[in-house]
């Protein structure tokens, strides 16, 4: 079997049919579809069972609710394909996505093959990136590209050689894709990005990325801090990029906490402030984007003024963080 496609499923009965049908309709047919029902309380599990009866390529796992990382890990444990891919259960993929990814991987003898992504919000569409260019990376270049978002940080627009994918387990609830990719990239020799848009990432109003701040959001800075430590030990040429990624994560988390009323999350707010305190020399001695430098220095100068300016800017520009807290 050439490919295992793992889909974690949790309470998405409204969308799951179109997701599964987009997978079963692939022009590439040599795959198994592993549906991991992660304790759904709607009829998502029944829909998974229906497709297992309908198509012999479908395998269903039912488990108690432990989150997306545990669901993906359950799929990894039983996957039989030479390559492994992931799809989120409320997204859809173009009919030739996996034929494109497989053919690109084989042509370039790559450990990981990546395609472009169409990110569809309720209020806008973003492309990552649709240039039709093909770029081949070694592991250092690919990890640098991950930090700089040269391609999507998701696992859903990629296929991985199974012997590499199975070495690493997913962790956490937020930014788990980025951290998994970071650890996987370390294990690779060659990664190829065929920048044609094939994956449709459909962001709903009730999706994880559109919810208010919770303690799970701290995963974003826990992971980026671990990335810095790993780079210090193994990848010294990427320490600057890892620190910049961590700085931006802390600023983004600060903004989310402020939009969610910091009085309700003082411990988390103070945690982020302590992290940012460590970046004074970094910000002023390195070349970083003006918006991040201004944000950092205004916050350090006067947090109250920063909060007012940030909230005003978010409302004027219709920024994502303001929608997460409506």
Image: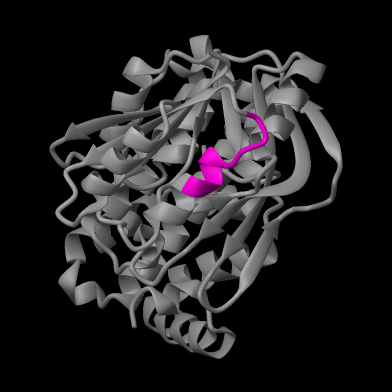
Q: Is residue 250 above or below residue 70?
A: below
The one nearer the camera, 232 or 118, is 118
Q: Residue at x 55, y 13 (%)?
A: 82
Q: Quick one: 257 or 195, which is closer to the camera?
A: 195
Q: Is residue 160 visible?
A: yes
Q: How is the image coloured?
A: one colour
Q: Is residue 285 left or right of residue 71?
A: right
Assess whether residue 188 is covered by the magenta stretch: no
Above-or-below relation of 225 to 186? below
Q: Residue at x 67, y 35 (%)?
A: 27
Q: Is residue 127 left or right of residue 107?
A: left
Residues 324 and 200: in front is: 200
For the point 48% across and 80% down, which residue is it? 310
Q: Which of the 4 image quarters holds residue 302?
A: bottom left
For the magenta stretch, what is the residue range?
Answer: 21-28
Horizontal side of 146 relative to 268 (left or right) equals right
- Seen from the viewer's position, the closer of residues 167 and 234 is 167
Residue sticking out furthest to the front: 54
Residue 174 placed where, x, y %? 36, 48
Q: From the viewer's perspective, is 48 left or right of 40?
A: right
Q: Position of residue 292 (x, y in %)?
A: 59, 63
């Amino acid at each position: 079997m050439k490919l295992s496609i793992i889909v974690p499923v949790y309470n998405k009965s409204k969308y799951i049919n179109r997701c599964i049908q987009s997978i079963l309709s692939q022009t590439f047919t040599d795959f198994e579809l592993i549906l991991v029902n992660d304790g759904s309380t709607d009829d998502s599990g029944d829909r998974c069972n229906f497709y297992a009866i309908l198509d012999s390529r479908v395998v269903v796992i039912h488990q108690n609710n432990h989150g997306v990382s545990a669901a993906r890990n359950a799929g990894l444990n039983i996957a039989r394909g030479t390559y492994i891919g992931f799809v989120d259960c409320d997204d859809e993929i173009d009919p030739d996505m996996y034929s494109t990814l497989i053919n690109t991987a084989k042509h370039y003898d790559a450990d990981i093959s990546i395609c472009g992504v169409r990110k569809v919000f309720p209020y806008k569409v973003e492309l990552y990136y649709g240039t039709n260019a093909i770029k081949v990376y070694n592991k250092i270049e690919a990890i640098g590209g991950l930090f700089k978002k040269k391609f999507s940080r998701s696992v859903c627009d990629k296929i991985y050689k199974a012997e590499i994918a199975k070495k690493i387990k997913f962790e956490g609830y937020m930014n788990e894709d980025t951290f998994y990719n970071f650890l996987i990239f370390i294990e690779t020799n060659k990664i190829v990005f065929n920048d044609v848009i094939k994956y449709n990432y459909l962001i709903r109003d009730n999706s994880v990325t559109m919810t208010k701040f919770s303690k799970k959001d701290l995963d974003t800075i826990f992971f980026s801090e671990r990335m810095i430590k790993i780079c210090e030990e193994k990848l010294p040429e990427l320490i600057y990029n890892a620190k910049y990624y961590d700085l931006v994560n802390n600023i983004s988390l600060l903004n989310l906490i402020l939009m969610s009323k910091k009085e309700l999350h003082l411990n988390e707010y103070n945690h982020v402030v302590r992290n940012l305190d460590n970046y004074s020399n970094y910000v002023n001695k390195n070349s970083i984007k003006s918006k991040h430098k201004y944000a950092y220095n205004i916050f350090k100068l006067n947090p109250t003024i920063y909060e007012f300016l940030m909230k005003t800017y978010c409302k004027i520009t219709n920024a994502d963080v303001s929608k997460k807290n409506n």
